[in-house]
Image: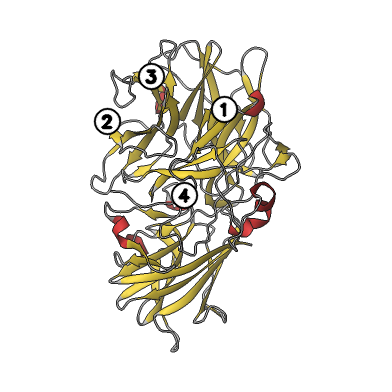
Amino acid sequence: MLIAVGSSITPGQAAGDKAPVTTSAGSPVNAWSELRWARGIENQRMADRGDGTFLNPVMAGDRPDPTVLKDGDDYYMTFSSFDAYPGLVIWHSRDLVNWQPITAALKTPIGSVWAPELTRFEDRYYIYIPARSPSHRPDYRSIYVIRADDIAGPWSEPVDLYLHDHIDPGHAVGKDGKRYLFLSQGDLVPLADDGLSTVGPVEHVYDYWKYPPNWTVECACPEGPKVTRRGDWFYLITAVGGTAGPPTGHMVIAARARALRGPWENAPNNPLVRTVSATEKWWSRGHATLVEGPGSAWWMVYHGYENGYWTLGRQTLLDPVRWTKDGWLEAIGGDLAKPLPMPLSSEAVPHGLALSDNFSNGRLGSQWAFYKPGPDESRRVRFDDSTLVLGAKGRSPADASPLTLIAGDQAYRVEVEIEIDERTQAGLLLFYSDRLYAGLGMNDGHFVMHRYGRERDFVKPGNTGRRIFMRIENDRHIVTIHTSTDGEHWTKFPVQMETSGYHHNVAYDFLSLRPAIYAAGNGEARFRNLKYEAL
């Protein structure tokens, strides 16, 4: 099954080339100087401050478990995409701060995707993908692999490695040139030379560093192993402490060995990174990848929750690293609340991804993803004269596989025109999961208010037919809805909502609260000119 998705790089275009950038009016701009004013059409705050410094996050919104590949002067990164498909969007950078999407590598649903590994071996790219609970096998989990000759694709169909008891693969190449995957819990498994199967048993090779028992953490949860070779040493970066729960739980630890099977020596300065107080800007910092940046400086890329904004998911953070004289490393960015010097680089790609969509391209852009799609989900989508036509599915947002966007702002507004068929229900949401969402829908007879993942009918004004404009404003968790029959004169919906609890620590699933559109019931719904604006 192939779900159509837009790409910022067209077939045949070099991955490092800059794609054309336009303003909302469609005219070309100088991406480096002009994208700073375009925050209203971006899905994330601009990390680069234009004064030789950057401010975290480098990727705002739900970009968890970052895996970074250095490929010459280019850097590529992807993240856990969980239940969103197309998934595993690959981003490109030249300086580790400014990032531009290339393509979505995973188009065939294999379940909820957790903590992938992006790597290159010889002349091919690979992504190792832990996934669980596909729709046709809800109790199944494993690790898969996809590969491509070009980072922009096409990417292969997933191959099951039948690793049912582990998550978070980390690719490594031994001094003998053989390939391995590090796994959660300090385990290791050898790979075939082509990287598409295992060729030996899983071995336990590493015992993680133990934090003091009086620290406030979620769980031990050793995960996210990433291996970097520097000189004669292999360095193993691991996360412990749990990825959510208390803000002080997650942390980054390091170990080193001269061979992949060890013996591994834990760093004397562990943990390298840890949130020590809930008053800090970034909570639950962890799950790091170590990468050599431009100018031979070293960095760690990891995720964290923004203080007070669990709803935005785990955002991507960049932390400078210094090597010590005795061959260890230390993070030197502090709590990442203040601006840091930019990586040394003479080039930057245009940063970010526009969320607004007038649906004139005849395809879904890289910003869109279905929640828990079925194998034939793409058949629900067609385009007609700058209109997204979405076939109805299910009875409510819970089983309608909404189309979602990743928001990276604390306050934003989303607006769209909606027209429905008879017996169709459609609307605009802030969607966390099939159990928790908020927003407004419309059917032939009623408005349908969604709150707490539950539905309640409201009388639809007499002059409201099957076409309406909807607007949702999320102002730092306070949600206000407006409707309009002409797109100019707006009426405030009588119920406002508070959504600060729509997140993992309340509802599980490691997701984020996302703007979304849906169509349920029978027939089709038409969506026109979706506008996203940061406030």
Q: Are marks 3 and 2 in contact (CB under 8 Å)?
A: no
Alpha carbons under labels 2 and 1: distance apart: 29 Å
In percent of width and height, residue 132 lies at 32, 41
First of labels 4, 2 by sequence position: 2
Q: Measuring 66% from the left and 45% from the top, which residue is drawn there? A: 279
Alpha carbons under labels 3 and 2: distance apart: 17 Å
In this rendering, the answer to whether 291 lies above or below 426 is above
Alpha carbons under labels 1 and 4: distance apart: 29 Å
Nearer mark to the viewer, of 4 and 3: 3
Q: Which mark is residue 366?
A: none
First of labels 4, 3 by sequence position: 3
Q: Which mark is residue 291?
A: 1
| Structural crowding at the residue carrying mark 3, measured as other residues with C-alpha within 10 Å and reported as few (<14), some (14–19) or many (≥20) | some
Q: Measuring 51% from the left and 48% from the top, which residue is drawn there? A: 62
Does the image show residue 427?
no
Residue 216 lies in quadrant: top right
First of labels 3, 2 by sequence position: 2
First of labels 1, 4 by sequence position: 1
Which residue does the numbered mark 4 point to in the structure image? 504
Q: Nearer the viewer, residue 287 or 91?
A: 91
User: Amino acid type of disc 1?
Assistant: Val
In percent of width and height, residue 535 lies at 64, 62
User: Helix, strand or loop at disc 2?
Assistant: loop
Q: Which mark is residue 162?
A: 2
